Image (spheres, grey):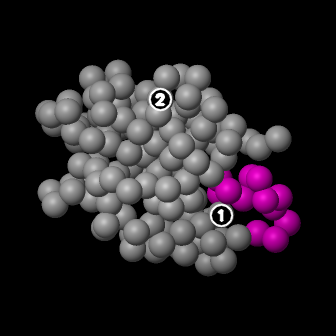
Amino acid sequence: MSLVYEPSEDSYLLQEVLMNHLKKRSKKIKIIEIGTGSGIQLETLKKMGFKNLSGVDKNEDAINLCKQKGFEVIWSNLFSNIKEKFDLIIFNPPYLPADKREDTESAISTSGGKNGSELINKFLVEAKTHLEIKGKII
């Protein structure tokens, strides 16, 4: 059984950033969250009035949890199953270096690769082809 990443301090900081930076944005913008976890950011955006929301995760339990909350979330390793472009891409990446003692299921939520930055680097390379011309990444 997989674990769903529970919101922690970094999740709440990201939530605050979203609330502050998006309060005056059009509620029609197209938003995707990479690595939805519990869905806290999608819930925040929905409460703010944003309607065009979607997300991806590699964790089936996280996907099912977000679907139960009414969100459109699919399985994808970063953008592997995404073809569209977005006005806003949200990503709260795992950034810790890989730890051989950690089990594979929990490493999905915490490990950013051997040195901790490999996943972020891969995300940045892939994200540019999924961002609208004036799109943003948070």
Q: How far apart in space, not on screen, are marks 1 and 2 (Cα)? A: 25 Å
Q: Mark 1 points at which residue?
A: 111
- Identify the mark at residue 71; answer none if there is no mark: 2
Give coordinates of residue 136: x percent, y percent. 24, 55
Circle 1 SS class: loop
Depth check, front residue: 87 or 82: 82
> Residue at image x 60%, y 38%?
63
- Identify the mark at residue 134; answer none if there is no mark: none
The amino acid beneath tag 1 is: Ser
Q: Start and end of the magenta stretch?
A: 99-110
Mark 1 burial class by Cα count in 10 Å: few <14, some 14-19, many 20+: many
Residue 8 appearing in the image: no
**Placement of the N terminus among the 4 image quadrants:** top right
Give coordinates of residue 93: x percent, y percent. 51, 57
> Residue at image x 32%, y 42%?
31
Q: Does the magenta stretch include residue 109?
A: yes
Horizontal arrangement in the rendering, residue 15 relative to residue 106 (left or right): left
The amino acid beneath tag 2 is: Phe
Residue 123 vertical placement versus 85 (above, below): below
Depth check, front residue: 42 or 56: 56
> Residue at image x 49%, y 56%?
81
> Residue at image x 52%, y 34%?
39
Q: Is residue 59 magenta?
A: no
| Quadrant housing residue 54 | top left
Please count the marks in the image. 2
| Quadrant housing residue 17 | top left
